[in-house]
Amino acid sequence: MTGPTGKIEPQPWLTAPQTRKVMKALDADGGEARFVGGCVRDALLKRPVEDIDIATTEPPEKIMTLLENAGVKAIPTGISHGTVTAVIGQAAFQITTLRVDEETDGRRAKVAFTDDWEADAARRDFTINTMSCTLDGDVYDPLSGMKDLAQRRVRFVGNARQRIEEDVLRMLRYFRMHAAYGAPPPDISALVACRALAPRLAELSGERVRDELLRILLGPDPASAVQLMRGERMLHYILPEAADVGVGELRQLIWLEGPAVKIDSVAPDALRRLAALLGARVDGGEAAAAAKRLVLSKKQTARLAAMVNPPFEIAPDMDEAGRARALSRMGEAAFLDAALLAWAAERTVSSRQTSKRVQNWVAL
């Protein structure tokens, strides 16, 4: 096994008492625990670390015992797959025994436990997610993830097609990760594999597709991600209603939701962005079909329908009586959705608007 090749300087998540307590508990009986995945990746980039994932050589039943012996609450969230959640106060840590895949079907894997760190890294999705880090900040990088991270290159571990066949959802994850961590041009082997395997997206549950699509829409550059997905025919299988349309309205909505306009109570909203992606090109039946395919809740379905086909035409030059009627019938939240989408659609035709026109939209 190769030694550490990098270093993460002390960061609040790494030095927090709760973190140290969990790691010390896992190492108490001769095992080895390291931080893995997104927390290591984001720490190397000096981005905020949200979720702390830990891998260990200890088997899951022993993880439970070690945590409980240290006075840490242990929850067997996925113990058959080697995953335990440790909870200290408001902090939660997902801990997983090192694994290798024995069998996959494109949706889930049958795993075997191992003590081989490099074998565990080799089963992961992207090289930038394969680094691991000790409590002291020593980074292990068996698959050159640090180099790819520095070069803003998102690529699959090993053979892209094989990685996707293990879990078809990785196709959608690729586009999300490329938008968040990559730079043009995208990895050609990834695109070739995604294009070839795109029809297999139909095998995924609507819930898994929905969750990943909404995460893409809330990502750092969703319009570019969606545009790339459309070019590789991903949308034909997950959102055919938007498969042959542009992303101009989505791009304009993202701008309106951002700090440039500074509209009170407006924040990035995945469902509103989905409505912008669908746009006025779809009718109520198509919006309902998209909602059903993505297994949206009744509340989400109703909101999407109202955004795609609002009961009133919202514009900054509507008179006060018309505005009052629309507000009364729609409610403030739905009125705001409709106004933002109407403004985004107008800007798609011409983003060069007078300051007075912008002020009128904001005042609406």
Image (cartoon, rainbow, N blue to C red):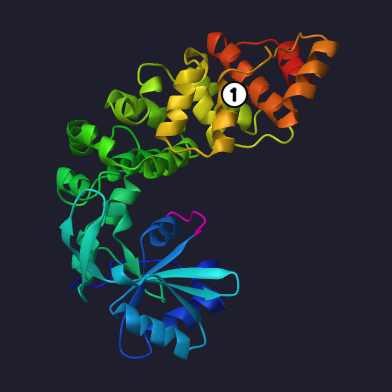
User: Looking at this view, is 247 or 178 the one in front?
Assistant: 247
Instruction: Give the answer, above or below, for where 191 lies relative to 66.
Output: above
User: Looking at this view, is 46 or 329 the one in front?
Assistant: 329
Q: Is residue 270 magenta?
A: no
The residue located at (28%, 78%) in the rendering is 57
Q: Is residue 293 left or right of residue 300?
A: left
User: Looking at this view, is 148 or 28 the one in front?
Assistant: 28
Q: Is residue 3 left or right of residue 289?
A: left
* Element on which disc 1 rests: helix
**What quarter of the picture does the C terminus occupy?**
top right
**What quarter of the picture does the N terminus occupy?**
bottom left
The residue located at (30%, 42%) in the rendering is 204
Quadrant in the picture for residue 81: bottom left
User: Looking at this view, is 115 or 328 the one in front?
Assistant: 328
- Can I make out residue 190 in this image? yes
Instruction: Give the answer, above or below, for where 313 lies relative to 49.
Output: above
Looking at numbered disc 1 in the image, what kind of residue is underneath it? Met
Instruction: Give the answer, above or below, for where 122 lies relative to 4.
Output: above
Disc count in the image?
A: 1
- Can I make out residue 11 in this image? no
Highlighted range, magenta? 45-50
Instruction: Give the answer, above or below, for where 266 lies relative to 49.
Output: above
Residue 72 x/y as whole percent: 51, 82
Residue 287 x/y as whole percent: 48, 23
The residue located at (40%, 38%) in the rendering is 179
Disc 1 target residue: 307
The residue furthest right is 321
Looking at the magenta stretch, what is its main secondary structure?
A: loop
Residue 180 x/y as whole percent: 42, 42
Q: Is residue 268 left or right of residue 178?
A: right
Q: Give neighbour class at mark 1: few <14, some 14-19, many 20+ (Cα, 10 Å).
A: many
